[in-house]
Amino acid sequence: MAALKPPSGAPLSTLAYSAIITERSATGRQSADLTRARPKFDVRKLSFWYGKSQALFDISLTIPERSVMALIGPSGCGKSTLLRMIAGLENVTRGEIAIGARIVNSVPPKERDIAMVFQNYALYPHMTVQDNMAFSLRLAKAPKSVIDARVGRAAEILGLTQLLRRYPRQLSGGQRQRVAMGRAIVRDPQVFLFDEPLSNLDAKLRVQMRGEIKDLHQRLQTTTIYVTHDQIEAMTMADKIVVMNSGNVEQTGAPLELYDRPANLFVAGFIGSPAMNLIKGRIEDGAFRGEGGITLPLPDGAGAVGRPVIYGIRPEHFQIRADGLPATVHVVEPTGSETQVMAHLGGMPIMCAFRERITAGPGETIRIAPAPGTAHLFDLATGQRLSG
Ligand SMILES: Nc1ncnc2c1ncn2[C@@H]1O[C@H](COP(=O)(O)OP(=O)(O)OP(=O)(O)O)[C@@H](O)[C@H]1O
Ligand SMILES: [Mg+2]
């Protein structure tokens, strides 16, 4: 419970509540004022250094107005740094950030009309949940009726109604995280920046909150950047996903584009769970010959004869087929909806996920083949996609 700063590091601008949206519609839901600006967002060739160490390398992104962009990538890849720059908490020394048509490089945080939920959210320890959530609106001198309505509605969405009189020390980590979200929601900003807002919640609450945030976005349509480690969260919530790695953007695209056509090995291995099988080998006589002596059909558009390549096949794209390759079952994991099988194919460990239930046990042989048109091919040296 460190900083005693408001969530964005600055008070709400009066602009932020000029278009009040607290009226309840006939269904009792908060209704959006769709004339309110929900601007697009551009990041152009943004680089950033912590001292001598470069954290971001020439990042360029466009977040269309009213959309949700998810930012994913391994720990330390620069996600929080990028969000902090967009919020105005770090100085831009190279590149540009534009909200709508306006370049905001030197616009102070409080004038950006952005609400950020930090990864290490800090609540005011001496204020109740109610007061924590109302803080920015009070600072902006919003009328009491507006404050009460907005805080009440946010508490309802976040399941905090019974906890409004408590202090942060009397809450669990997940409840505190929801209060931090509530603080952002009540402000109704033009842009939301969420840095892993659900990471402290248990699995069930996470799924529920994910639905609530999605529903909230459908109603308010606030342009949103959402950082998460959880790729299912990213895939289900975002219109577009940006995959980052070591301060670079590896690929940007719609969730299923990234799943169906990963641009390189990094994205191929990062998106999808269980992860894509990646098998080393080369192209010979119009087929893929893997280490361990297996031969697999080539995906369309794969040139690169003789070149060392990586063949990618997702666990769920293996099929049981009488004419398939023999694979020795190692471990069988039934999850109910599917059966995950760790097996050895030509001596290499692979993972398969079948919709059907499998009776084979460890040590037995199953015959498997990639479903037609599902394989991927990557250049071994560059990691770039070769198949169409
Ligand atoms: N204040 C700082 N001073 C120096 N280096 C920093 C500072 N903050 C972050 N870094 C470094 O910058 C890089 C990016 O950090 P950042 O916090 O943006 O990563 P992240 O993608 O948000 O990671 P996580 O998923 O763990 O939150 C890391 O290598 C980190 O060690
Ligand atoms: Mg972070």
Image (cartoon, rainbow, N blue to C red):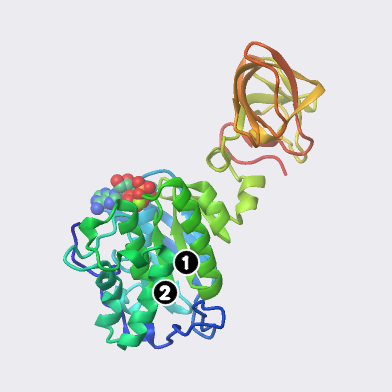
Query: Callout 2: helix, strand or loop?
Result: helix
Q: Residue at x 62, y 14 (%)?
A: 362
Front residue (pair 182, 157) = 157
Would residue 84 appear left or right of 211 to someone viewing this image? left
In x, y percent, where is residue 228?
44, 52
Q: Which residue is mark 2?
A: 153
Residue named by callout 1: 224
In the shown orientation, is residue 112 left or right of residue 33?
left
Q: Return the residue nearer the eye: 214 or 42.
A: 214
Q: Nearer the viewer, residue 13 or 187?
A: 187
> Given the image, on which type of amino acid does mark 1 rest?
Thr
State the residue lying farthest toward the top. Answer: 363
- Position of 7 relative to 269 (above/below): below
Residue at the spot x=51%, y=80% of the render? 32
- Mark yes or no: residue 163 visible: yes
- Position in image of residue 130 (x %, y %): 28, 71
Rendered location of residue 274, percent (x, y): 57, 35
Give the amino acid at mark 2. Arg
Q: Quadrant of residue 268?
A: top right
Q: Residues within 10 Å of mark 2 (few under 14, many from 20)?
A: many
Closer to the eye: label 2 or 1: 2
